[in-house]
Image (tube, grey):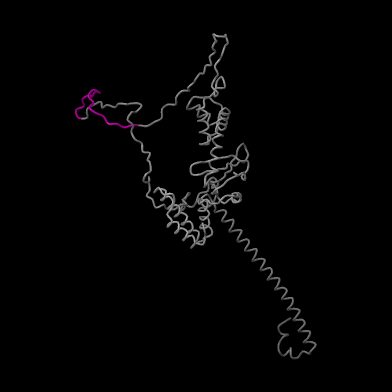
Amino acid sequence: MKQARFTRDRVSALSKPDLIDLVMELAARNALLQTRVDELEKQNRQLQEQNASLVQRVSDLERRLGLNSSNSGKPPSSDGLAKPAARERRTRSLRGKSGRKSGGQHGHKGTTLKQVATPDALVHHYPHQCTRCSATLSPEAATGFAVRQVFGLAPPPPLFITEHRAHTCLCRACGTLVRADFPETVKAPAQYSDEIAALAAYLQTQHCIPEDRLARIFSDLYKIRIAPATLASLIAKKADSLRIFADRVRELLSGVAVKHLDETGFRIAGKTRWLHMLCSTSLSHLRLGTGRGDIPSGLAGTIIHDCWPPYLALEAVEHGLCNAHLLRELQAIIDHDKEPWAADMKDLLSDALTLTQIAHDQGKPAVSPEQAHQIHHVENILNCPV
């Protein structure tokens, strides 16, 4: 309807029926417009909700892309070959400054190389000519000497072979032939010693050297030609002999008041396996499980972990969260969420660690009650309990 139809003069000239028709038409058009407005408002709300969802999704993806081993629980191996910006260090400490001077601390036993009183070999050096008159000098003209010592490795010893002989004796009383028994550890006509098995187990399990390279080490250093399969058998037997010890360590850890739990996955023979760790300040127990959720059972006391839900589901224990993981999570909040409280909380945890280390260096079991009260006071101000 054109605007000209709604001038005062034209409306005044309309009859009553025409006015009623006009009002009805305007009411219908208004209803159509209101319906359209409602639809547009509904679409607007849907677009706003979709936009908020997409913004949140983008934020989550950006946050996930920004996570690495320094601000999350991801292992360093997951960082790949990506390099951080030039202004950033590839690794950064989450503990902050400890307040200590750099270098060895008071009471720390140094490892400075010092001369020994009885060296294994002597090498004498004599001057051959006088620097003043060019006369020839002989060793008999020596009046003294200065000493410098070089510490090196002795050549690997040759293979040491011990032959066991079980003798047979004739009993003169009854004429019976009696043969001596071989030691229980000597079971084959020719075998490798327990020292070789121990060295192979140490190099493989502690330093992660594959069996084929381990065979080359024995060949290059000790001239021992030993097959990788034989090494695997020796290591397996050594592991079986330590099972009683491992069970005893697990038993001792069950009675420790505070213990730490963690797990990590790795591939064995093309399959994913999980290594579960249970440790204290003095004992460590490693156990190979079939799944990540195959965590130890029957625990008591306080367990420290990374807040993984299956750990939190353990009953009859007190829970404590690993500060290293907390610091990395706080760093992620600082980097991506820009929350000011996260930096304060990170400083609080780092300062608490520093106070604990200082107390330990001073031979004290823990921080003083005054320091503990101050830590909890700051914690209450942050309204983010540890």
Query: Residue 260's x, y, as percent?
Result: 53, 46
For this orientation, the residue located farthest to the front is 173
For this orientation, the residue located farthest to the left is 133
Q: Nearer the viewer, residue 214 or 252?
A: 252
Which residue is drawn at the image coordinates 57% and 11% (left, top)? 177
For this orientation, the residue located farthest to the right is 17
Position of residue 253 relative to residue 152, above or below, is below
Q: Nearer the viewer, residue 73 or 137?
A: 73
Position of residue 301 relative to residue 160, above or below, is below
Asked whether 184 falls inside the magenta stretch, the response is no
Query: Residue 65's x, y, as percent?
Result: 56, 53
Query: Residue 121's x, y, as percent?
Result: 35, 26
Q: Which residues are magenta?
A: 132-149
Q: Is residue 134 visible?
A: yes
Quarter of the image that includes the N terminus: bottom right
128 left or right of 275? left
Position of residue 281 relative to residue 125, above or below, is below
- Principal secondary structure, stretch drawn in magenta: loop
Position of residue 347 relative to residue 233, above or below, is below
Res 278 → quadrant: top right
Query: Residue 100's x, y, as percent?
Result: 38, 50
Asked whether 135 falls inside the magenta stretch, the response is yes
Q: Nearer the viewer, residue 144 or 237?
A: 237
Q: How many marks?
A: 0
Which residue is drawn at the image coordinates 75% and 81% (left, top)? 27
Q: Is residue 285 visible?
A: no
Which residue is drawn at the image coordinates 65% and 63% (left, top)? 50
